[in-house]
């Protein structure tokens, strides 16, 4: 979305300091915390808590045992799209991020744009030389002025600040470098609030007071794309299989189908593993079967460990092999193999899962190298009590990449996944995470584990069946799983739904 360029001007505030100047260190501390340099803690004003002492340097503040440094965004990209700030908002480091929005009155905006257009026109006429950057800026200002005149848009002034914290100055410098690199990848220019370190820190506290006031002007659409709960569409890959359609909050077609199709090629990623996490009834097995069938039709070899016989119909439709005895070797020509354990006695189900994984591992490790996928549905809950099977699963996670194999784990309880080292390996060694609808009880843990914003957490709790968040590498997007009528009949699990699908 286009946004006009503007010069960041220095301006004075009521305390007499300017954006480019310093500040009275002692008076700032006294006015805000009721303490002075070299004094003990005093009663905080208005009931706000106050640290016992502050150590203020030109580029950092120390409160208690923690160092803080604030970065202000002074350079922005020319165009933005929905969810473009998500990589910054989901950064897992110790940081507080504040985003200030201030509406600009339409008459003020009109005067501002009129002056801008006049300045651009004057500059272009004086130089007599084509300046592409100046021409683009003039066109942007013209478009926004017309949009405001028609009542379709208005202007907002945005300020974005990031406060980092660490136990030492060396650690703070390291965190600062990482965040500046991340900002650069988003075409953001992040600068420390030098000689205004205290004001920068206060601007990111939950006080709602922007004491830095480094702002950039955006129009309505560009400002809306900066909201923390906005999730953009994923670019995806030019190869791979269809995962679904993007769910856009700003663009929904008449049928509610969402945005553009999203294709993902797991073999184009650093590792080829995927985790599907969802509450009961959210559509995780349905989604896994749809993706498995598309992979098989693309030519991948698919090996399935199926404790509940949910993949039998799909395997048969694909011309694959269904094996009831987990120690039985599959035929060499079989490209889809399902170890169906639904008829296994409950007492030996754990053992059968381990045997099925052993057969799968032998085929992956000793067979010819080809694109393979191993699907383990709801098996992790049983692997906790089976060390041998746990080792085989760990081997698949760690070593399958060298054999051009990707592992797909489907489960509904993140607590079980995170409770062991193996579970952490599943998350850390999966390039694809598909999070479908979650319960309110589980959303806090999932939000912390995957760095979700508040809006994304709310979306997952209220998501309809078959919708969720797709996380691929550093990208993420809201997604709706879509299937054809034929796929739906093979993927649906509910008996009543199966009957309806069969009668279509």
Image (cartoon, rainbow, N blue to C red):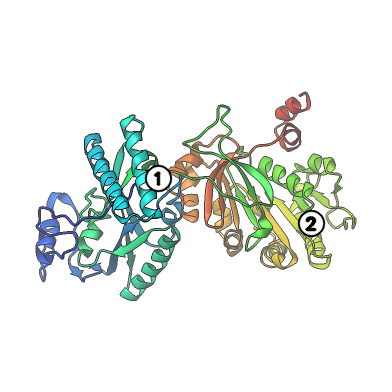
Q: Is residue 321 above or below residue 201?
A: above
Task: Answer left or right for 239 relative to 159.
Answer: right
Residue occupying the point 46% across, 55% down: 87
Badge 2 element: helix
Q: Residue at x 52, y 57 (%)?
A: 474
Of callouts 2 and 1, the N-terminal one = 1
Q: Please, is residue 497 above or below residue 84 in the view?
A: above
Residue 65 pos. (x, y %):
27, 70
Query: Badge 2: few (under 14), some or many (20 or more) residues near its Cα, within 10 Å?
Result: many
Q: Where's the N terminus, which quadrant?
A: top left
> In the image, is 32 to the left or to the right of 317?
left
Residue 435 x, y percent position in the rendering: 56, 47
The mark lying in front, picked from 2 and 1, is 1
Given residues 124 and 176, the one toward you in this image is: 124
Question: Is 355 or 283 nearer to us in this picture?
Answer: 283
Look at the numbered disc 1 and give the secondary structure of its residue.
loop
Give residue 404's position: percent from left, percent from top: 73, 63
Between 158 and 498, the residue placed more toward the observer is 158
Q: Which mark is residue 164?
A: none
* Gap between marks 2 and 1 measured at Cα: 55 Å
Judge left or right: residue 63 versus residue 280: left
| Residue 440 seen in the figure | yes
Q: Quadrant of residue 357?
A: bottom right
- Residue that carries the numbered disc 1 in the rendered image: 2
Badge 1 crowding class, 10 Å Cα cut-off, few under 14, some 14 to 19, many 20 or more, is some
Is 243 situated above or below 50? Answer: above
* Residues under numbered marks 2 and 1 in contact, where contact means CB atoms less than 8 Å apart: no
Name the residue that disc number 2 marks. Answer: 356
In the image, farthest residue toward the top = 503
């Amino acid at each position: 979305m286009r946004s006009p360029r503007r010069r960041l001007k220095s301006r004075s505030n009521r305390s007499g300091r300017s954006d480019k100047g310093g500040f009275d260190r002692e008076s700032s501390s006294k006015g805000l915390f009721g303490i002075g340099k070299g004094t003990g803690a005093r009663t905080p004003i208005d009931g706000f808590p106050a640290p016992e002492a502050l150590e203020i340097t030109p580029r950092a503040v120390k409160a208690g045992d923690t160092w803080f440094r604030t970065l202000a965004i002074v350079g922005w990209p020319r165009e933005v799209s929905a969810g473009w700030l998500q990589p910054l908002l989901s950064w897992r480091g110790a940081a507080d991020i504040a985003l200030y929005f201030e509406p600009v009155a339409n008459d003020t905006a009109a005067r501002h744009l009129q002056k801008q257009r006049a300045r651009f026109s004057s500059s272009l006429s004086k130089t007599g030389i084509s300046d592409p950057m100046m021409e683009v800026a003039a066109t942007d200002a013209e478009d926004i002025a017309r949009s405001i005149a028609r009542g379709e848009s208005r202007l907002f002034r945005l300020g974005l600040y990031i406060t980092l914290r660490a136990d030492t100055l060396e650690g703070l410098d390291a965190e600062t470098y990482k965040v500046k690199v991340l900002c650069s990848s988003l075409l953001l220019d992040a600068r420390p609030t030098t000689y205004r370190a205290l004001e920068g820190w206060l601007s990111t506290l939950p006080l709602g007071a922007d004491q830095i006031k480094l702002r950039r002007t955006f129009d309505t659409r560009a400002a809306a794309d900066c909201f923390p709960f906005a999730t953009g569409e994923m670019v995806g890959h030019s190869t791979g299989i269809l995962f679904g359609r993007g769910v856009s909050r700003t663009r929904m077609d008449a049928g509610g189908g969402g945005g553009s199709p999203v294709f993902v090629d797991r073999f184009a990623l650093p590792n080829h593993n995927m985790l599907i996490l969802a509450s009961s009834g959210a559509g995780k097995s349905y989604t896994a079967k749809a993706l498995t069938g598309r992979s098989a039709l693309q030519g991948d070899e698919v090996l399935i460990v199926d404790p509940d016989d949910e993949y039998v119909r799909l395997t048969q439709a694909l011309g694959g092999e269904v094996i009831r005895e987990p120690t039985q070797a599959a035929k060499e020509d079989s490209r889809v193999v399902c170890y169906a354990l639904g008829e296994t006695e409950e007492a030996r189900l754990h053992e059968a899962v381990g045997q099925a994984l052993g057969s799968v591992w032998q085929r992956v490790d000793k067979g010819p190298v080809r694109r393979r996928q191993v699907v383990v549905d709801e098996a992790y809950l049983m692997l906790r009590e089976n060390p041998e099977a746990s080792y085989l699963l760990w081997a698949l996670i760690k070593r399958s990449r060298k054999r051009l194999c990707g592992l797909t784990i489907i489960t509904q309880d993140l607590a079980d996944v995170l409770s062991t080292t193996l579970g952490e390996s599943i998350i850390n060694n999966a390039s694809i995470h598909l999070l479908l609808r979650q319960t309110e009880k589980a959303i806090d843990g999932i939000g912390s584990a995957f760095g979700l914003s508040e809006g994304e957490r709310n979306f997952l709790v209220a998501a309809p069946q078959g919708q969720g968040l797709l996380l691929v590498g550093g990208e993420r997007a809201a997604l709706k799983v879509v299937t054809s009528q034929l796929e739906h009949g093979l993927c649906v699990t509910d008996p009543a739904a199966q009957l309806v699908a069969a009668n279509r």
